[in-house]
Amino acid sequence: MSHDVTGKATVPAPAQPNRRVRRSRRWATSAALVGAVGVGAPLAMMTDPAAAATPSVSGYTLITSAGGVFGFGAAPALGSALGVSSSPVVGIAPDSTGKGYWVATANGGVYSYGDAKFYGSAGNIALKAPIVGIVATADGLGYYLVASDGGVFAFGDAKFHGSAGGLNLVAPIVGLSITSTGAGYYLVGADGGVFTFGDAAYAGNLYSTFSGPSPDGPAVGIAADPTGPGYLIATAEGAIVSYGGAPFFGSPSLSGVTPAEPLVSVTYEPGGTGYWATGADGGVFNFNSSVTTGTGSTATLVTTGNAHFFGSVPGELGPAGIAIPDNVVGFAPTL
């Protein structure tokens, strides 16, 4: 069962080789699709053998700009966000129980589903720029909204540590990620620039890495290491770059995969043993820690990470010849 919260309580904020993305079909739906099939991305070599003990995520939910919802694995069927707002959906964030999530729209609206509680929205604020994402706190008792001008809005137990709203940005902000302690967060711009707040430690950006614009397209998201300092930045054309010691297990571009549609997000699993990259077509790429057992002809690569593959939108709808026109804009693991 799902419920939509339309109240608008608000909290005002203080101040590798180049690969081209092949454009193809786009997708959306109003129904939850559970147990879909598809092909996961190749795995990278392991960096932490102890990581196998980390509890597994049991599924994930994707959402489109129109509010269509796709559930895979054990993701709960809580209903879609189709028609909840005239403003496009920009993101989805899971609560801590695995039985709910929040959906954000570009005009600052927040809608709760399942047992996710509503803590407020920016729907009644005269925003200077559209909201581009929503991120929940680890305990599920609050969330952040981030705007393309770098504005940050904190609700529930989410602590405000500052924003880039007063800066003259070179490129729009495209993502926010909370540090492992919960006492800070990173913002990333489309140019790969990184802004740190609270205890978030700056460790580099795409422009400095490539001495200019990224050859693999603009940045689309940032994922803070959930177990320590550092972060990943993902680009539209499939590159994933690690900074500050954040665990790196591979990327679509390094695996020789050209995403059919641009990537839109990168998300660590809670133990930091793997991560998912999501495409605008609903394609899901998973990368995990792994270890080689045996030697010589008996050597076997064993996955120890917990970013499991449960399915993808093209894997479910593609074989049926169904093409749906709205981009996927958000990914939420079932915690």
Image (cartoon, rainbow, N blue to C red):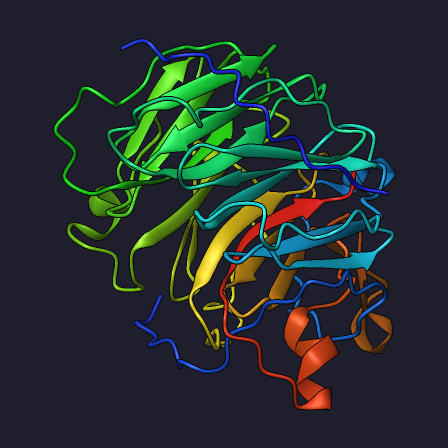
Could you say which is closer to the camera, residue 134 or residue 86?
86
Residue drawn at (50%, 51%) of the image:
265
- Depth order, front residue of 69/188: 69
Give the answer, above or below, for where 105 lies relative to 329: above
Task: Name the spot of residue 266 as percent of width and height, x first.
Answer: 53, 49
Q: Image quarter for residue 153?
A: top left
Residue 33 location in percent, x, y?
Answer: 79, 65
Residue 224 in view (yes/no)? no
Name the residue at 66% across, 90% down: 321
- Identified at 26% across, 10% down, the residue is 15
Vertical placement of residue 163 versus 247, above or below: above
Q: Where is residue 103 in the image (x, y as percent from the top left)?
A: 59, 40
Q: Quadrant of residue 35?
A: bottom right
Image quadrant in which the C terminus is located? top right
Q: Residue at x 66, y 22 (%)?
A: 118
The answer, for residue 194, to whether it is visible in the render is yes
Query: Does residue 25 appear left or right of residue 236 in this picture?
Result: right
Instruction: Give the percent coordinates (x, y) of residue 37.
Output: 79, 74
Q: Where, quadrant-wise, is the N terminus in this rendering?
A: top right
Total marks in image: 0
Q: Which of the pair 59/213 is nearer the observer? A: 59
178 over 15 or under it: above or below: below
